[in-house]
Image (tube, grey):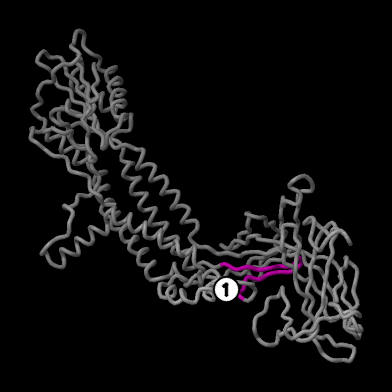
Amino acid sequence: MSTTDKTAGTGTGGGAAPGTDDAGLGDAASQLSTAPLEDAPGAPAGIGVIGWARWFWRQLTSMRVALILLFMLSLGAIPGSLVPQNSVDLLKVAAWKDEHPKLTPVYEKLQLFDVYSSVWFSAIYILLFVSLIGCIVPRTWQFVGQLRGRPPGAPKRLNRLPAYTTWRTEASPEDVLDAAGTVLRQRRFRAHTLGTAVAAEKGYLREAGNLAFHIALIVMLVAFAWGRLFFSEGGKLVLKGGGFSNTLTQYDDFKSGSLFDSDSLPPFSFVLDEFDATYERTGPQKGTPRDFKAYVTYSEGADGAPKKAEIQVNKPLEIDGSKIYLLGHGYAPVISVTDARGKVVFKDAVPMLPQDGNLTSTGAVKVTDGYRDKDGKKEQLGFSGVFVPTFAGAGKGTMFSQYPGLDYPALALTGFHGSLGVDSGLPQNVYQLNTSKMKQFKDKDGNPFAVRMLPGESMNLPDGAGTVKFEGIGRWATFSVTHQPGSGLALAGAVAAILGLAGSLFIQRRRVWVRAVAGPDGVTVVEMAGLGRSESAKLPEELAELALTLNGLAPTAPGAPEDPEAPEDPEAPSEEPAEAPVEGERG
């Protein structure tokens, strides 16, 4: 037995080698190609509206145009990451417009502040969607037809195929064909006997992977569009012991998709019971965060039973399709304010915003109601504060924290009296004071009045205006509540796309034929040949393995020549020149 690896290529469509005039080989190559046949490129001339419509449809559903649309979609997404978007942060958009007054009208006409909902981005998105569907439908029907069909019969001259071997055996042609069919089916080939040859085919998952990849792309496009149109995301700062209900008015900030309905917010609530943070104590990484945990009690629905849960960074709590993420944390000094008459007009935990990694924090205390000075006049008080969880000590440094843990907490306050401007109806930053209509308290020397306090200490305001006491220290945490529909579908589409692409790249579509014909001397001549959709070194190796297995069942006859000349098979297709079709470029 001898095995030959023909060096002539099979072409991109699995066709015959150059110079081959075998009609059967041409038929086999034609059927092996899974690409839809197309007419010659170029726009039609003088064929009317229908002809132009067909030509446009062919161009839209071609691989070339699909890749161009995908590239345009990628380019179109770039402005969305460089230019502030209205759907993400209106304040940043307003600030950008103030800084670039000349570019703003141009950007607005180009819809660069709403890239993902713009007309031009939506047009590219929809065209890509249609292109993929138009590509998949004909390929799917063609693939179904191939699955229902049978491999074509053997070409007349098998020795012209890229991989070929032959030997002589004393077994009858019928026994050889039966053994060949059994061996090929054991190797998961689809095989059937046609005349004096067994035709087998394998590698259908290649085209299945190609279709799965294209379908997965459509699934991902649908999932992204769905998630973008119906998503919602909001942030909330919650003090220790405080709670949150999932209603629109409870959020500190909120953004959503264009088709989102606020009535669709799932009903739930939670209370922040405790917050723990641990930091590195020693070494070069002193102060580095190690672990953050928020312990909450939550309820689903209006009458849901309370449940305990932990929320950690990157480990959200999921309730009815919404995910609650832990974003940040900080300290909230508990401050009480007593007016000149001795009445407590304010007592609450005041959140302070961290300014550095050691949680040096700043904030504001606003006393809007109930305060009266020593003359009984109604006023509003405001205090700007700096809080440090670990103070270096008096005379040892400024008000900058040395460590994020509560080793030596200190609070510095300076006070103002007058009007906070909260009655104007304009929104204010809760962490800053508007002192345009306020006067700062002065000490006896006329200097701005400011006092640094430790927990439990208090300061007396000038001229008997009252007392401010540093009662203690609370904690706060910020949470992000997100509802992103379609994320699971997008993940499934991405996994399917990877698997489909891997199948279309690494699975080879190939055919094998085994012919057994009785020679003039009564000894059976066995021929085996293989044809792949594209050239591969694995095809001759696989054919050699199959030939060795079959040769064990139909051994070489004693004294048989190495390369016997195969007798003519009268049932094989007639030999006429045939040209293998070029594989089209449809998606």
Q: Quadrant of the N terminus?
A: top left
Q: Which residue is mark 1?
A: 91
Residue under the point 89% across and 91% down: 375
From the top left corner, tell me how far across and down residue 72 is, in percent. 36, 60
Q: Which residues are magenta?
A: 233-248
The main secondary structure of the magenta stretch is strand
Residue under the point 40% across and 57% down: 219
Q: Quadrant of residue 392?
A: bottom right
From the top left corner, tell me how far across and down residue 180 is, in percent. 25, 25
The question of residue 397 being in magenta is answered with no
Amino acid on which disc 1 is placed: Leu
From the top left corner, tell me how far across and down residue 243 is, in percent. 71, 69
Give the structural element (helix, strand or loop) at label 1.
helix
Assess disc 1: are there few (<14), some (14-19) or many (≥20) residues with their C-alpha within 10 Å of its C-alpha.
few
Q: Quadrant of residue 541?
A: top left
Residue under the point 76% across and 60% down: 274
Q: Is residue 580 left or right of residue 288?
A: left
Q: Between residue 81 and residue 130, name the one nearer to us.
A: 81
Q: Is residue 356 above or below residue 108?
A: above
Residue under the point 50% across and 62% down: 485
Q: Between residue 119 and residue 170, name the one nearer to us.
A: 119
Q: How many marks?
A: 1
The question of residue 241 being in magenta is answered with yes
Q: Is residue 97 above or below residue 127?
A: below
Q: Between residue 55 and residue 159, name the one nearer to us.
A: 55
Q: Quadrant of residue 165?
A: top left
